[in-house]
Image (spheres, rainbow, N blue to C red):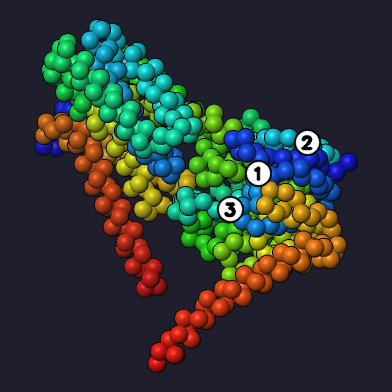
Amino acid sequence: MIGLIPEMFTYPFMCRAFAVGSLIALCAALLGVTLVLKRYSMIGDGLSHVGFGALAIASAMNAAPLAVAIPVVMAAAVALLYLSENSRIHGDAAIALISTGSLAVGVTVVSMTTGMNTDVYNYLFGSILSMSEGDVVLTAVISAAVLVVFLLFYNRIFAVTFDETFARATGIRTGRLSILIAVLTALVIVIGMRMMGSLLISSLVVFPALTSMRVFKTFRGVMISAGIVSVVCLLLGLTISYLHATPTGASIVLCNIAAFFIYLGISKVREKTYNKG
Amino acid sequence: MSLISCENLSFAYEGVTVLHDLNFTVERGNYLCIVGENGAGKSTLMKGLLHLKKPSAGTLTTGEGLRPDRIGYLPQQTPVQRDFPASVNEVVLSGCLPGLGLFPFYRKQDREKALRNMEALEIADLKNRSYRELSGGQQQRVLLARALCATGELLLLDEPVAGLDPLVTAGMYGLIRKINKEMGITVIMVSHDLKAATRYASHILHLGEDRQLFFGRTESYKKSAAYHAFMGEAAVHIRKQGKAAKDPAQADKGGV
């Protein structure tokens, strides 16, 4: 089986998956820390369903999938923020509305046009084969841009996540910053859902953050750990998926679950030794 | 010119005025306590002073070059913060953000400023500890250090001793007095604790229902009708509570 691993890299599609996947995993994990702490964990889930609807419509119209999905999901992200802050429909309910609504639209469009084929299955559960060369370039450019913007705003994002009132009182434009976070999340969701599948992409956002918070106690520590955990789980998951022909997204999520329990174990052991000492 | 002056200032929520015609001024170096019962609009006024809420009428002017975004603010703690992974240093440094302008990262002088403020509040040894593992009093000191990083002139404190035990409360009041006297920073504090307010503050603003009952120096406040009415009410309230607590005990004894 070890011999299969070098062989894996002779396939261009696997190399593409490793490169692009790592970038996406890193972006998703970093944003995820903020989203989880701001109690916005489900926003990723809602947006990925919108992404499914958009992809279904794009394939019905024979349009480029990402070109349709990116603006639609970004608009949905801003709309979700607006709904949860300015109306009587609160965060979780707004997400439920938008996500089930767009899933319904997507399924209807699919059944009226192509029917449930492999493409649709891949939209839902992801596939490493789905990345064309054009997709790879676009995805790499977008995730690099997300990373740079995130690093430039890192200190402000910390301030807004920790204490929005204080941040607002000291002149940080928290509204604009929330929109920025929502837009970045939307971008990561769209580029990640081709590989992970729209049903599973939000795990890439939530798991590494929650896992890292078991053990690390500073914001920077959690961020760094989340990034590493996310990339390692992605690489492991992809390898398992290649070796055993398991679904890519699901394999990556299973690795994330394992990481979560490992971290949980570490924190329990640490607590015990701490109590003894 | 005063640091802050309010003329006929009013605030409203959805057309309903919750505070009418406030008139008061804050001079550099003052220590103003805003007292009043729950629902008297203390928090609303706080938001107004921070420019987070627009007045519905009247004027709020800041003078002597005080920029509205350079006010140090100590908010009440939120539930999110109790399990937030952040080091003390990260929290205190975030008070330096308004000074950065458009520059994205902290500079050397920001780190030094944060350290100076941690030293002044005697929490420098907690620098690398996690905020969520600290005691309530320590957490308040961290947030106070953050507020100090944001300002050199004016601190706004929203119930800084809520939920702290008496010893820690006394320490906190001591620190606030030190900040006011030694660093020369003007302090505006919202408080429930009338005793401490009249003991430490130089000025009192007493809000009742939806209007201002008193504004002036603490000495004259102690002679005012508003003070005696408030103290009287508080005394009646305590007596009532005492009775309620005693009665069932007596009933028990009677039963035996």
Which numbered mark, 1 or 2, is in the foreground of this view? Answer: 1
Residue plotted at (58% across, 53% down): B76
Task: Answer left or right for B185 relative to B48.
Answer: right
The percent coordinates of residue A187 (x first, y second) are 39, 24
Three-letter amino acid code at disc 1? Answer: Val
Residue beneath disc 2: B59
Which quadrant of the rendered structure holds the N terminus of chain A?
top left
The percent coordinates of residue B212 (x first, y second) are 75, 50
Residue beneath disc 3: B76
Residue plotted at (55% across, 53% down): B77
Chain to which the residue tagged by mark 2 belongs: B
Sequence-wise, the earlier of marks 1 and 2 is 1
Q: Nearer the viewer, residue A53 or A195?
A: A53
Task: Answer left or right for A177 relative to B56.
Answer: left
Residue beneath disc 1: B18
Which numbered mark, 1 or 3, is in the foreground of this view? Answer: 1
> Residue A67 — which label?
none
Give the CA distance from mark 1 to mark 3.
Answer: 21 Å
